[in-house]
Image (cartoon, helix red, strand yellow):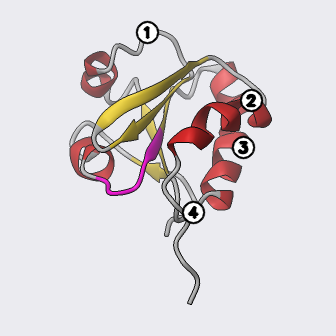
């Protein structure tokens, strides 16, 4: 279980995101983007707090334009939740953690059972 966001690329997106058995929140970002830097700590917290029920990934749109284009990312930050290989929720722009989780929570996997 990753407690940190996983860096994905055009080359690894299929395996890390589309083939994941766990829902994946992908943060499409760029280093020069101020709102991206504002939301980064929130994305990191979500990765830690939701480990096991949500995988969190980050994709730099400047380094990986093919994937950003494929999913119609025109503004950043854009966060997309993928479930069973399909985009099921799209969030464009900065928003506070509580509002972000309100949008993500319905797509989370069931929590693993404790033994």
Q: Rounded to the nearest whole Å, what is the CA distance between mark 2 and mark 4?
A: 19 Å
Q: Rounded to the nearest whole Å, what is the CA distance between mark 4 and mark 3?
A: 15 Å
Look at discs 4 and 3 and give the one toward the viewer: 4
* Location of mark 2 (residue): 99
* Location of mark 4 (residue): 51
Residue displayed at 27% across by 40% down? 85
* Location of mark 1 (residue): 74
Q: Quadrant of residue 74?
A: top left
Rendering coords of residue 34 (x, y %)? 69, 20
Q: Say above or below: 37 vs 115.
A: above
* Location of mark 3 (residue): 41
Mark before the other along the chain sequence, 2 or 3: 3
Rendering coords of residue 12 (x, y %)? 25, 47
Q: For residue 24: magenta? A: yes
* Foreground residue among 66 and 43: 43
Rendering coords of residue 68 (x, y %)? 34, 22
Q: Say above or below: 61 vs 43.
A: above
Q: Does the CB distance between marks 1 and 3 fall below 8 Å?
A: no
Q: Residues within 10 Å of mark 1 (few under 14, many from 20)?
A: few
Does dot 4 land on a helix, a strand or a loop?
loop
Q: Rounded to the nearest whole Å, what is the CA distance between mark 2 and mark 1?
A: 22 Å
* Foreground residue among 105 and 25: 105
Q: Say above or below: 75 vs 29.
A: above
Q: Does the CB distance between marks 4 and 1 fall below 8 Å?
A: no
Magenta range:
20-25
């Amino acid at each position: 279980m990753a407690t940190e966001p996983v860096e994905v690329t055009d080359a690894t997106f299929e395996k890390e995101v589309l083939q994941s058995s766990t829902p994946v929140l992908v943060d499409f970002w760029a280093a020069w983007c101020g709102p991206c830097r504002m939301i980064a700590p929130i994305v990191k917290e979500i990765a830690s707090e939701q480990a096991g029920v949500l995988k969190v990934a980050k994709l730099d749109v400047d380094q990986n334009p093919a994937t950003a284009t494929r999913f119609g990312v025109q503004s950043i930050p854009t966060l997309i939740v993928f479930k069973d290989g399909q985009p099921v929720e799209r969030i464009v722009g900065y928003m506070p953690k509580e509002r972000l989780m309100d949008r993500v929570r319905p797509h989370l996997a069931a929590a693993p059972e404790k033994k």
